[in-house]
Amino acid sequence: MASASFQTITPVDGSVYLERRYADDGEIDDALSAASAAQAAWAATPISERAALCAKAVDAFVAKADRHAEELAWQMGRPIRFGHSEVGGFEERARHMIAIAEEVLADVQVGEKEGFLRYIKRVPLGVVLTVAPWNYPYLTAVNSIVPALMAGNTMILKHASQTPRCGERIADAFAEAGLPDGVFQVLHLSHEATAKIIASDEVDFVAFTGSVPGGASIEKAAAGHFLGVGLELGGKDPAYVRADANLGHAIENLVDGAFFNSGQSCCAIERIYVHADLYEPFVEGFAELTRQYKLGSPLDPGTTLGPVVRTSAADFVRGQVEEAVAAGAKALVDPTGFPADAPGTPYLAPQVLVDVDHSMRVMSEESFGPVIGIMKVGSDEEAIGLMNDSPFGLTAAVWTEDTEAAIAIGDRIETGTWFMNRCDYLDPALAWTGVKHSGRGCTLSRLGYEVLTRPKSYHLRTAT
């Protein structure tokens, strides 16, 4: 019996971009068996050889950057002019994790003790399942794929139905590099099949990036099966512009941090608090720069703001804006200045709201679209309270010329990453992690390898 299929509807024009068939039970069983069968030999492969193969895969992937950029535009709507930035980020993260692997995965020495040899090995977990999202389909996937493989695990990737070709392109790169059979595989899976695999006791770790409800579903499927789960979930990331901030730099960076990728980033800036001393010029400059975006087809090289992923996502943001305005907020951007903006389509003009407060959904609920609310504050203390008034805690940022003040404020902010004078960026040398509803676990950096391995202690008596 043939398995069901799914279609990817492009936000460019609402047409069917591609169609794929979900893996059936037999294909899933075969993939799990192949991953398990390949794991021991892969774990026994020297790290230097794993690194060489992974590096070749990165080379193969980067060589086709133009194709990736165009396919990203069709699948999820990012302007083609920005597609290369995701390829560059994929390369940066992959090469960093490859470069540090041998040192990080080396045996842990615990000191000499007469008559004994003692050390701790970092042992791979086994089979890792990565469930990747559509909004940064390469950047999010690479966070777990390369370190999992470098640590000696085998890998199965399930990509979002909006971006299935991205998973296939990663598989193409590893195949071109000559990765052994069964070490890296891609399956197109329904939600039900994904949950079944997680609960099958045939995978040893799940790396998930997506929504809070999606994370809850992953945890539910994993419950009672004693496997590790890494969750990178939503955000409502705040920024604070202090009175001593460089105004022009803050405006330029925060506009980009709010609206890049049409605001469809877990670590996008979604709410801004500005000290009263800078509030008026900041709001004026922010709105003016926002009005300079060009909304249109992501295939047009001149477009700087593409459509959101689907019409329902655009309608969600429109609803947040309408509710806020009805409750007293003021919208500073006239959508008629963006001819492509059209209700009933995913083409949505950016919006800047003032006179907002935390009773409004736009300031408390993840928007995942091109809208930002800006509030005036009178002190650091007020800003800290508002920044922490959220169920999310992925990243947060401050604009200031005072590093000591930035550190002191950061120590009190409930967040996984704290920025000063930048935002919406992931440094692969630092742990990528969140608190509260933004998830649990860690990817990238030295610490990212810890969740993809387990410690195995060796306690050897050498004198009897």
Image (cartoon, helix red, strand yellow):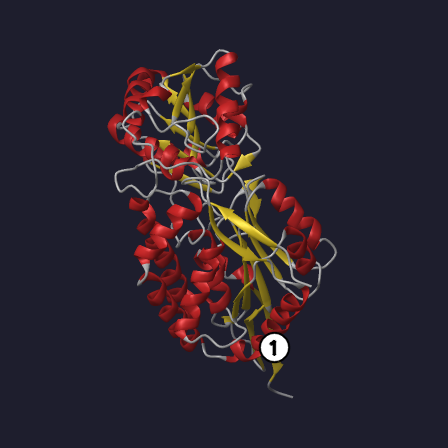
| Percent x, y of residue 14 | 46, 40
Q: Is residue 374 above or below residue 438?
A: above
| Front-most of residues 120 and 299 | 299
Q: Which residue is mark 1?
A: 37
Residue depicted at 57% across the width and 44% down the height = 439
Q: Is residue 282 in view from this perspective?
A: yes
Q: Classify residue 400 by image quadrant.
A: top left
| Percent x, y of residue 117 | 56, 79
| Front-most of residues 38 and 167 | 167
| Percent x, y of residue 9 | 49, 45
Q: Is residue 234 above or below residue 159?
A: above
Residue at the limit of the structure toward the bottom, as seen here = 464
Residue at the limit of the structure toward the right, as seen here = 224
Mark 1 surroundings: few (<14), some (14-19) or many (≥20) residues within 10 A? some
Task: Name which residue type carries label 1.
Answer: Ala
| Front-most of residues 427 and 162 | 162
Label 1: element kind: helix
Q: Quadrant of the N terminus?
A: bottom right
Q: Classify residue 99 by image quadrant.
A: bottom left
Q: Quadrant of the C terminus?
A: bottom right
| Percent x, y of residue 13 | 42, 39
392 with respect to 93 (left or right):
right
| Front-most of residues 15 and 101 | 15
Residue depicted at 55% across the width and 59% down the height = 451
